[in-house]
Image (spheres, rainbow, N blue to C red):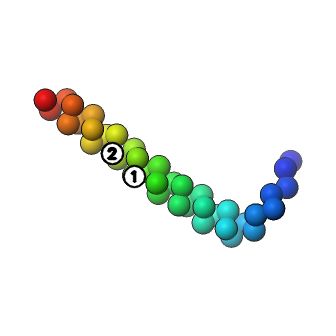
Amino acid sequence: MYKLDIPSNDLFIDLADLRKRRDKDIKKMLDLLIELEDQ
């Protein structure tokens, strides 16, 4: 096991932020796919 030097609270916030950003990126990709199919 690796010991992280990051306080767990900061890590949790980072993970939540990453998940939000990833969801946004997935949404953008889906929107692009829909646009391509509509053409």
The residue at which mark 1 appears reads as: 24
Q: Secondary structure at mark 1?
A: helix
Residue 1 numbered tag: none
Q: Residue furthest left?
A: 39
Residue 13: x %, y % from top left: 60, 66
Query: Does 11 sit left or right of 24 as displayed?
Result: right
Tally of numbered discs: 2
Q: Position of residue 23 (x, y in %)?
A: 43, 51
Q: Is residue 9 left or right of residue 18?
A: right
- Secondary structure type for disc 2: helix
In the figure, is residue 39 to the left or right of 28?
left
Please give the name of the residue rendered at 19% of the width and 29% of the height, measured from the top-left corner.
37
Under mark 2, the amino acid is Lys
In the displayed structure, 8 sits above or below 32; it is: below
**CA separation, marks 2 and 1?**
6 Å
Q: Do residues under tags 2 and 1 come within 8 Å of each other at their CB atoms?
A: yes
Q: Quadrant of residue 12?
A: bottom right
Q: Position of residue 11 (x, y in %)?
A: 67, 62
As drawn, 32 above or below 5 = above
Residue drawn at 27 percent across, 34 percent down: 33
Relative to residue 39, is residue 30 drawn left or right? right
Q: Position of residue 1 (x, y in %)?
A: 86, 48
Which quadrant holds the C terminus?
A: top left
Q: Residue at coordinates 27% horizontally, 38% vertically from top-left?
A: 32
Residue at the spot of label 2: 28
| Circle 1 crowding by C-alpha within 10 Å: few under 14, some 14–19, many from 20 | few
Q: Residue at x 76, y 63 (%)?
A: 6
Amino acid at the residue labelled 1: Lys
